[in-house]
Image (spheres, rainbow, N blue to C red):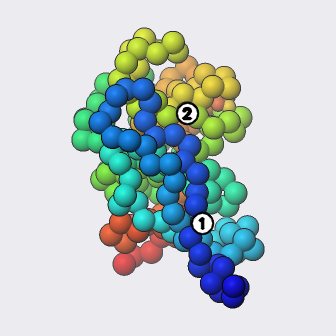
Amino acid sequence: MQDKDKTRRKVLIGLTSAVGLSGLPFAATPFIAAWNPSAKAKAAGAPVKLDVSKMQFGQQIQVSWRKQPVFIIRHTKESLASLELSLSKLADPNSDLISEPYKGLFPTRSKSSEYSVMSGVCTHLGCAPKYFPEVEPKSWDATWSGGFFCPCHGSMFDIVGRVFKGVPAPTNLIVPPHMFDGSILTIGEDKEL
Ligand code: FES
């Protein structure tokens, strides 16, 4: 196979989690295809492109950019509407404590009104927070309204990655530069189309 072909081949990126045990009416899609540059370019931080149109509502997938996990979530209308439920628990609801590229644009914190794009690295000591979108009591929070829980030291974030008060993680999950061209999401690049 030509190198060029190799670099253009579809690379399957693993799915970390889709939905919890909430009985949401869709099945998890185990993989998503991303069109990645060469390994060398990737190591240098080349952008990662993927088509997010096939994601199910409520689904979370993970891709790797600059060797770091990036979470992408396609929100349901209900989950976005439930953002209010955890508002009083948040330490920095407007991301005033960090430099956030698309601050105030959409409740998703991204450039899309439907998808969130955020680093999958806990801002405490770098573990991977787990996605629990269901609104139901959890062992770590009896009034859980969906979000991320970091199993290492118990930090909690809402479904758009905003950190709760009183947890070890100091800030919201970081939003990387990205852009959407229709359903094609590019992570690591942001330019006007
Ligand atoms: S690394 Fe996530 S809570 Fe410590």
Name the kind of residue labelled 1 in the image: Val
- Residue 67 in view, yes or no: yes
The quarter of the picture where the N terminus appears is bottom right
The residue nearer to you, when weighing 149 against 25, is: 25
Q: Looking at the picture, how far across and down is residue 76, in whole percent? A: 29, 42
Sequence order check, earlier mark of 2 and 1: 1
Tell whether circle 1 marks a residue whose Cβ is less than 8 angstroms from ligand 1: no
Q: Tell me: residue 74, above or below residue 185.
A: above
What residue sits right under mark 2 in the picture? 130
Judged from the image, the secondary structure of the residue bearing numbered disc 2 is: strand
Within the image, what quadrant is residue 170 found in?
Answer: top right
Q: Looking at the picture, how far across and down is residue 93, in whole percent? A: 41, 35
- Identity of the residue drawn at 65% across and 86% down: 4
Q: Looking at the picture, how far across and down is residue 50, in whole percent? A: 48, 65
What residue sits right under mark 1 in the picture? 11
Within the image, what quadrant is residue 142 found in?
Answer: top left
Q: Tell me: residue 129, above or below residue 119.
A: above
Circle 2 residues within 10 Å: few <14, some 14–19, many ≥20 = some
Name the kind of residue labelled 2 in the image: Lys
Q: Tell me: residue 109, above or below residue 169.
A: below
Q: Tell me: residue 108, above or below residue 36.
A: above
Q: Do the residues bearing badges 2 and 1 touch, measured as CB atoms within 8 Å?
A: no
